[in-house]
């Protein structure tokens, strides 16, 4: 999200230029849903670039189209005519077949009849990779999210936070180059959420995976992201892009620093819009 | 200290003992008791004396229903898989599916006899009865994929094949077994109803037919109880696997987002074409069966000839008059039984909300009784109500009541907790909750129940007419069967299936209108 003039435009003039390799290019992608009461515009055509290794947070009120945007990058929704989404120069549906995409939703969406280990290994099976050969990866991810000893437990035997951690481990099992997180901690309480934020930062720092996090939480966005994309609703659009200057690794003590709060307040203002109408 | 479960079990045991003691006393000492509710000891002694008959008839019915069940569920599971993969195919087969669900099974027996030999008419009827519940439960299970998991599979590049392999097939298992559980008693009912029509020598249907005129209450009760026991054993067989599976299959969290229905509800040519196909398909299959089997058109007329039989020709007026008279006797009674059964079920389900003890006592009985084959109540009905119209009404009420009660009770218990809490928070009592919350919430269930049991009411009345009262559509078919009046058998079967399907569709239509 740098304002440096680029050598030659990668795609269209709408997309802000960046330096270095770019993982996700969103070019004039909008989304209109057809409903019984006529078309509803969920997302104005928007453009955005996510550089390799970046941690970008999408934040905004309900109905601002942030989840729709994430789903378009995952290839679960198609942008309207005239828009395009490219992930590592490929069409999302092409990209995800290569197993380079990791995804976690607000709900863990675990298969209730599979153990923790089998749930974590599920993406491997979908991609047709041998699960046996990746046994060590599965085990290390389970340990990474702090579920050692629960490998054979069923989802029904776990707490909400533990299930969410299984979903995080599952999103990393394919060793993705792009990670999409759709409010993964939305259903957790504040204390657990902060602990998971610290954990996620640790995981991200170890792998430097390009990550897009959709969230409601202002503090979560500021704590985790390099760049926060603020969105407004009716129709969904990008209002502002804010760079987060804090050095990494960010410690839990950051949550109580005045600079952190100042930036959170700045974000809150941006969320409400200049006219304060939101 | 005694564990609560032990105390509960002791109470059930005690209640059961009292029940049998009272039954024994009434059945052995009062004169009406001897005639209507013979004492358990007498029923057992009679059954012991009849043990050879039980063995011969019982093994025939068990064999027929087991083979029919196996055929029926195999076809059902294959059909459910195909329908899941191709919703268009399901639309095209909708006519067949609804006809199979709504058909009064007793009219199919005499038709199957024309094509099939030996035990096959009963076996095929058992398979036909099994098909719909097993198919619809399996299809429901296959379709009910958590949308979030479908997204997950798609995000890793998995298509419908992977989704089917890893999610749908395993996820459908509890529904599959639930379907089998409901279907197993229906296989027994199908076998017995088939025996009425085929005139076979062995089987509980034949046993019941021969016992009805004998005036031996203990034997009649024995037959009813034994056929119930076989049917419920089939039900119990699939109870355990279903329990096992459901523990590891129910989603641990609720779906955060409900995906909107994909169809936009509009009319397009594809849907209209498929709807046309679905109406035509049953008649095409009828025509094909008649043509390909090379049975004489006098015995097995096609759709055209059956229609002509009612419209023109020298017997048409007489046939129409006979059918109309029969319908005039049957339909009011079926409607009366349906409404009375539904009303009774609704009131009792509502009462269970005011007095939970009623539900605790009634629900286990209803859960079991809704799976009893309706022929099993014939002995009870004939002994208590005789052979006139009251017997038919009661029969219809009885087959309507139990499934309707179970469904309505579910409706009353699925009322959101917060809604009833809201009424309590403003000082409203149970009555207020019932009037403002529970009844409005359960109206949908009332229609669902009506749709499910309306065909049952017609079947119940027709069975009573066939076996007991000697009037109406059931009787007309039985007489035509005896008199080898093939045209009338086909016409009667066609009319009763059409009425049943129309009733089903009409309730569904009202349900959709009210639901909006």
Image: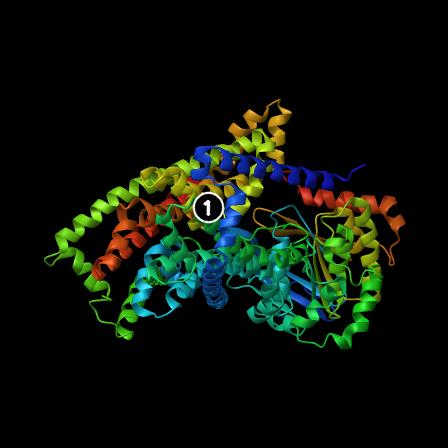
Q: Residue at x 55, y 25 (%)?
A: B432
Circle 1 packing at 10 Å, graded few (<14), some (14-19), many (20+), is many
Q: Position of residue A264 (x, y in %)?
A: 78, 45
Q: Is residue A38 visible?
A: no
Image x and y of residue A73, in percent:
63, 63
Q: Is residue B405 above or below residue B131?
A: above
Judging depth in this view, the residue of A167 and A55 nearest the camera is A167
Front-most of residues A20 and B164: B164
Image position, residue B74 (x, y; %) = 49, 68
Residue on which the image places disc 1: B218
Report the residue that reaches farthest toward the left. Answer: B314
Total label count?
Answer: 1
- Can residue B256 be seen here? yes
Q: Position of residue B380 (x, y in %)?
A: 43, 43
Q: Tag 1, which secondary structure? A: helix
Considering depth in this image, is B5 or A236 the residue closer to the camera?
B5
Q: Which of the 4 image quarters holds residue A70?
A: bottom right
Furthest toward the top, the residue is B427
Q: The N terminus of chain B lies in which quarter of the figure?
A: top right
Task: Please tell me in which quadrant of the rendered image residue B410 appears.
Answer: top right
Residue at image position (69%, 39%) is B10
Relative horizontal placement of residue B353, taking residue A157 as reference (left or right)? left
Colour treatment of the image: rainbow
Instruction: Identify whether B373 is placed above or below A210.
Output: above
Q: Is residue B83 left or right of residue A86?
A: left
Q: Is residue A34 left or right of residue B429?
A: left
């Amino acid at each position: 999200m740098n304002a440096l003039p680029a050598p030659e435009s990668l795609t269209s003039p709408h997309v802000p230029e960046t330096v270095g390799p770019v993982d996700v290019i969103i070019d004039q992608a909008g989304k209109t849903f057809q409903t019984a009461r006529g078309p509803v515009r969920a997302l104005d055509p928007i453009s955005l670039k996510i550089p390799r290794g970046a941690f970008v947070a999408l934040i905004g009120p309900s109905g601002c189209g942030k989840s729709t945007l994430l789903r378009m990058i995952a290839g679960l929704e198609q942008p309207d005519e005239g828009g395009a989404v490219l992930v590592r120069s490929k069409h999302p549906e092409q990209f995800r077949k290569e197993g380079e995409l990791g995804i976690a939703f607000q709900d863990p969406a675990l298969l209730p009849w599979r153990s923790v280990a089998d749930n974590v290994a599920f993406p491997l099976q979908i991609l047709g990779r041998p699960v046996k050969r990746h046994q060590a990866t599965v085990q290390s991810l389970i340990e990474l999210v702090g579920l050692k000893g629960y490998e054979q437990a069923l989802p029904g035997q776990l707490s909400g936070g533990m299930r969410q951690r299984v979903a995080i481990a599952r999103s990393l099992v394919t060793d993705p180059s792009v990670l999409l997180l759709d409010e993964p901690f939305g259903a957790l309480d504040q204390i657990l959420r902060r602990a998971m934020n610290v954990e996620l930062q640790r995981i991200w720092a170890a792998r430097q995976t390009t990550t897009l996090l959709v969230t409601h939480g202002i503090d979560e966005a500021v704590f985790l992201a390099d760049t926060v994309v603020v969105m407004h609703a009716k129709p969904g659009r990008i209002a502002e892009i804010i760079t987060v200057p804090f050095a990494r690794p960010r410690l839990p003590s950051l949550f109580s620093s005045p600079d952190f709060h100042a930036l959170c307040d700045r974000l809150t203002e941006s969320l409400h819009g200049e006219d304060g109408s939101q | 200290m005694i564990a609560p479960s032990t105390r509960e079990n002791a109470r059930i045991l005690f209640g059961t003992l009292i029940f049998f003691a009272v039954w024994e006393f009434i059945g052995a000492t009062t004169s009406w008791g001897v005639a209507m509710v013979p004492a358990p000891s007498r029923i057992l002694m009679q059954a012991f004396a009849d043990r050879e008959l039980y063995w011969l008839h019982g093994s025939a019915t068990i064999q027929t229903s087991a083979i029919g069940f196996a055929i029926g569920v195999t076809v059902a599971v294959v059909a459910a898989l195909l329908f899941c993969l191709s919703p268009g195919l399901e639309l095209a087969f909708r006519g067949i599916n609804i006809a199979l669900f709504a058909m009064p099974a007793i009219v199919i027996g005499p038709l199957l006899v024309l094509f099939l030999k030996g035990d096959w008419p009963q076996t095929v009827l058992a398979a036909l009865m099994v098909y719909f519940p097993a198919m619809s439960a399996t299809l429901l299970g296959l379709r009910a994929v958590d949308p979030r998991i479908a997204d997950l599979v798609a995000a890793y590049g998995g298509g419908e094949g992977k989704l089917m392999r890893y999610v749908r097939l395993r996820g459908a298992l509890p529904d599959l077994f639930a379907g089998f559980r409901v279907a197993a008693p229906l296989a027994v009912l199908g076998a017995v109803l088939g025996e009425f029509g085929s005139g076979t020598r062995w089987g509980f249907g034949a046993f019941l037919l021969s016992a009805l005129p004998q005036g031996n209450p203990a034997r009649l009760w024995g037959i009813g109880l034994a056929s119930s026991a076989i049917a419920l054993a089939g039900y119990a067989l699939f109870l355990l696997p279903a329990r096992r599976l459901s523990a590891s299959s129910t989603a641990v969290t609720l779906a955060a987002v409900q995906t909107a229905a994909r169809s936009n509800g509009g009319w397009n040519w594809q849907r209209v074409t498929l709807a046309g196909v679905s109406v035509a398909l049953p008649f095409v299959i009828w025509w094909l069966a008649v043509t390909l089997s090379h049975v004489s058109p006098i015995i097995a007329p096609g759709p055209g000839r059956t229609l002509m039989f009612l419209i023109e020709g020298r017997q048409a007026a007489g046939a129409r008059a006979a059918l109309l008279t029969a319908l005039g006797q049957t339909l009011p009674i079926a409607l009366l039984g349906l409404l009375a059964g539904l009303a009774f079920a609704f009131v009792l389900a509502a009462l269970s909300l005011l007095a939970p003890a009623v539900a605790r006592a009634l629900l286990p009985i209803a859960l079991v009784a809704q799976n009893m084959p309706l022929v099993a109540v014939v002995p009870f009905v004939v002994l208590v109500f005789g052979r006139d119209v009251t017997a038919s009404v009661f029969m219809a009420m009885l087959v309507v009541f139990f499934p309707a009660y179970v469904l309505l009770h579910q409706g009353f218990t699925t009322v959101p907790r917060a809604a009833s809490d809201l009424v309590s928070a403003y000082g409203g009592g149970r009555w207020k909750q019932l009037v403002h919350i529970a009844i409005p919430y359960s109206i949908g269930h009332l229609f669902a129940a009506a749709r499910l049991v309306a065909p049952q009411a017609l079947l119940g009345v027709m069975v009573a007419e066939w076996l007991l009262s000697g009037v109406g559509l059931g009787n007309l078919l039985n007489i035509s069967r005896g008199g080898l009046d093939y045209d009338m058998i086909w016409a009667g079967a066609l009319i009763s299936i059409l009425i049943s399907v129309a009733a089903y569709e009409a309730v569904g239509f009202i349900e959709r209108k009210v639901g909006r």
